[in-house]
Image (cartoon, rainbow, N blue to C red):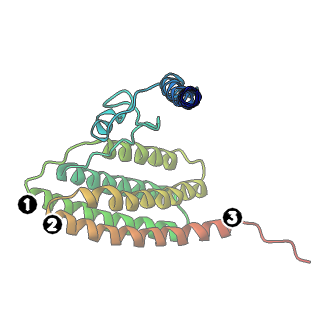
Amino acid sequence: MANSKLFSALFLGALSVGACSKKGDAPEAENAYTASNDTTTTTVTQDPMASSEPTTSGADTASLTPGPVGGIGGTDATGAAPVPQTAPLTDAQIVKVAETVDTGEIEQAKEVQKKAKNAQVKKLAAHMISQHTKSKNKGASLAKKADLTPEESTVSTEISSKGAAALESIKTAAAPADAERAYIDAQVQQHETVLELINTRLLPSAVNADLKAQLEETRSMVEKHIEEARKVQQALSAEATPPAPAG
């Protein structure tokens, strides 16, 4: 009887232990299932704000970097048009530019001398004829020495066109004062344009050493001509301004 009771106790104890074991295993299985579901969810779920493009490695990044939109001649990545580069002038073209400037200055000065009454204007015109004749002769000698044949360019063509317009304004002036004003205004404007042209186009483009040296001399001459023309321009403006009423 005692043995029967002992056996029953051991049997009940074993059942209890087995039940506890099965109960303890359930969370593990449930956790494993949950983890599997989490993995699946992570794989499938996608952030609606994220890019749909596949992630690439660092080695592929450079090959995928966008270049200029539209390729050569199009716009860059920002959509801005490329800045055009100004082609340098040849020495032969520079010689032609200088020749065109000198020729225009001489022609305009000679024309204003026919109409001007103002002594300062006539004196400046005579000075321009002398200075630019010397400059033109120097340019011709340099071109001959360097075996350069003056060559037209868009720069020399534009200078010639503007010079012709200034000459025409002097010719068609109705009165001496109008011719004087047209001449002096053109002198200031043209010399300022030539100075900028020397600094930004001619000197940076010149190759021949003698040509560069002459351009340096021409720059100094032009700077002085600007000062002289401005003084006469101011004098003409003062003469044209009526005196203020007394009192």
Viewer-side label of 3, 1: 1
State the residue at coordinates (46%, 44%): 165
State the residue at coordinates (67%, 70%): 238
Counting from the top left corner in percent of width and height, residue 98 is at 28, 56
> In the rendered image, which quarter is residue 199 located in?
bottom left
Figure check: 3 above or below 195: above
Name the amino acid, label 3: Ala
State the residue at coordinates (43%, 64%): 125
Q: For mark 2, what is the residue?
A: 210
Q: Which mark is residue 145?
A: 1
Counting from the top left corner in percent of width and height, residue 11 is at 54, 26
> Do labels 2 and 1 touch, CB within 8 Å?
yes
Q: Residue furthest bottom?
A: 247
| Lower sequence index among marks 3 and 2 | 2
Name the amino acid, label 2: Asp
> In the rendered image, which quarter is residue 130 located in?
bottom left
Q: Secondary structure at mark 2?
A: helix
Q: Which mark is residue 240?
A: 3
In depth, the one of 199 and 224 nearer the eye is: 199
Counting from the top left corner in percent of width and height, residue 240 is at 68, 64
What separation in Å lies between label 3 and label 2 (alpha carbons)?
Answer: 45 Å
